[in-house]
Image (spheres, helix red, strand yellow):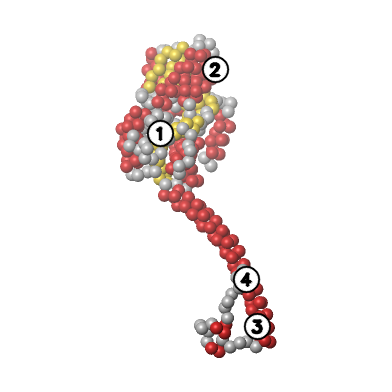
Amino acid sequence: MLKSSYSRSSDPFLPECERKPIKKEKRSKMKKFFALLLALVMSLSLVACGGGDTANEDTSTDDTATEENGGDTATASDVEIAVVLKTLASEYWGYVKAGCDAAAADLGVTVNVVGPGAESEIEQQVSMIEQQIGAGCDAIIVAPNDAGAASGALASAIGSIPVLSVDTNVGIEGQTSFVGTSNVDAAKEGGLWAAEQAGEGANAVIIYGQEGDNTSNMRREGYQAACDEAGVTVLDALSGQNTTDGATKTMEDLLNAYPDQIDIVLCHNDDTAIGAMNACKSAGVDDMIIVGFDGNASAVDLILAGEMVKATVAQQPYEMGYQAVEAALKAINGETVEEVINAPVTVVTAENGQEYLDSLAAMQG
């Protein structure tokens, strides 16, 4: 360390009175004083430096936490996710909507759930998709009534925002994810159960959904596969238009075309199953195995009451809605999302119906 050549007596910036030599005894006292002062200053400096580092780290952590937590919250609260379902006028889609709404509340995002008055209203759904995209949503989730029509409406959003399908796969190139059930496998499970109940040599009819609907096509395929495997003859397959009234009319036509020949009715959904049951009752038929699809509480109530609706293939619509919104937010945030998110199914019968209803009630709070 270099010695300083500084001298108070020669310092031109000090007043003359302060440049005078300091007496020896005073110098000794002053030396002790300055030594103590220096030690104190150094001690305070060390504390300040150490404390400063700690304070900066804590502040940085707090700021980071504030930015991350507050930022995430702020970001989430600004996020708007559009959900266009097949319709809101059914129990099943009400469950999907409930799942979407629950996810919105848990994740702190805004979710706008819309749907046409009926699953047959394809043009209205297309218009809703276009409106939601035009309004500037951050992601869109669609359950298409017609995959081709929905694809055309969604084309402008691909590459700009996350595009997801729920329940029914749009299948458009560039889609972020599909959240739903393997409809072929699920329908096959329901069909095999019905075939087992009916026994060998049984005859079945299939009441499928909307013409051109992917879900309808896949469920019909699954039912047909089950009948082929079990040796059940499929007499006919007709559309029930996805409605109770439509299925009632279709079942009336089938009963007239195949009097006393039908043992099993395999239906696209629970509304269709109820329509088929109504037609059977009106025709005085009381010995029929009717299988629905979706696991609606109304259908399970009929099963437990011993009606002709004997089973329903239960999806998890609430969970599908929740997972779709969850996946959409992940995609918005740049996180990896699986291309297919599968939801399991259960064949609900008189044996497990009450347990299923209890779980459904608990899920909805």
Q: Earlier in the sequence, mark 4 or mark 3?
A: 3
* Circle 1 residues within 10 Å: few <14, some 14–19, many ≥20: many
**Where is residue 96 drawn, in percent x and y?**
46, 36
At label 1, the amino acid type is: Gln
Viewer-side residue, 84 vs 47: 47
Q: Which residue is mark 2?
A: 197
Q: Nearer the viewer, mark 2 or mark 3?
A: 3
User: Which residue is located at x 58 percent, y 26 percent?
Assistant: 351
Give above or below for 8 relative to 306: below
* Circle 2 residues within 10 Å: few <14, some 14–19, many ≥20: few
Q: Earlier in the sequence, mark 2 or mark 3?
A: 3
> What label sits on residue 42 in the rendered view?
4
At label 3, the amino acid type is: Met
Q: Which residue is mark 3?
A: 30
**Where is residue 219 drawn, in percent x and y?**
44, 23
Give above or below for 335 relative to 204: below
Q: Which residue is mark 1?
A: 175
User: Which residue is located at x 67 percent, y 86 percent?
Assistant: 24
Q: Nearer the viewer, mark 3 or mark 1?
A: 3
At label 2, the amino acid type is: Gln
Quadrant including the N terminus: bottom right
* C-alpha distance separating marks 1 and 4: 65 Å
Q: Secondary structure at mark 1?
A: loop
* C-alpha distance separating marks 3 and 1: 82 Å
